[in-house]
Amino acid sequence: MVIPDDYMDQSMRKDVGLGGPYLLIMRRPTCPSGRRRLAEAARRAELGRVFERGVYANTDGRHFESVAEVRALRMMGADVIGQSMCPEVYLAREIGACYARVDLVVNYAEGVVRDWRHEELRELFFRESRAVGQILLDALRETPAEEECGCRDLRKDTLLTKDNAGKGEMRVGPDPAV
């Protein structure tokens, strides 16, 4: 299991948002408190090794990556590759929510060790789904109503005004004429 602390968005969905007036700060995309709780719950589940950090490379689906793509992502620093961290990480930040995730690694990427077999992937995926659900519920149960992790502070008012959005003009003071 990997609990990523960072990501690389290699998807084509770059402009996904809720239309909020925020500049999203992604220097710490996942909540450290949430990651800690997920790691503790994952260790109690005893499904295998738990890595408390890692870089998640997000790609577009409905296909797995080619051997060359996997090699390139690995050279860029990716530890795991998947298709489900973005846009979720952006949307969570936009609403000021904490975001953390646990990933069950179900196969080696193309060309890493050996060719994966669909039967193995399906068996592992369905066999461990209940345990992963329990990990999430356990971590949520331990989550306080108010968190002091600083995630809410990682969004700021945008510097672009609605009138100037898309024009590259910035507001430098409270008065739009300034």
Image: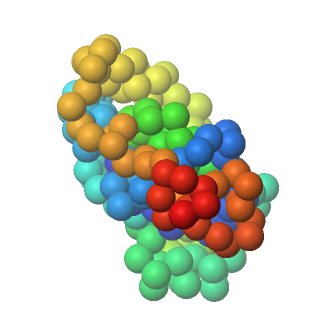
The answer to whether residue 19 is left or right of residue 25 is: right
Residue at the far right in the pictured view: 62
In depth, the one of 70 and 56 nearer the eye is 56
The answer to whether residue 56 is left or right of residue 120 is: left
Q: Is residue 151 above or below residue 136?
A: below
Q: Determine the residue positioned at 71% across, 61% down.
A: 164
- Quarter location, residue 136: top left
The answer to whether residue 166 is left or right of residue 177 is: right
Q: Determine the residue positioned at 53% across, 41% down.
A: 94
Q: Is residue 49 above or below residue 131?
A: below
Is residue 4 visible in the rendered image? The answer is no
The answer to whether residue 137 is left or right of residue 148 is: right
Name the image colouring.
Answer: rainbow
- Quarter location, residue 103: top left
Q: Is residue 134 above or below residue 129?
A: above
| Residue 90, percent from left and from top | 55, 48
In depth, the one of 24 and 68 nearer the eye is 24
In depth, the one of 178 and 158 nearer the eye is 178
Report the number of discs: 0
Q: Determine the residue positioned at 60% across, 56% down.
A: 176
Q: Determine the residue positioned at 35% across, 20% down.
A: 140
| Residue 175, percent from left and from top | 54, 53
Is residue 173 visible in the rendered image? The answer is yes
Q: Quadrant of the C terminus?
A: bottom right
| Residue 78, percent from left and from top | 45, 71
| Residue 104, percent from left and from top | 45, 44
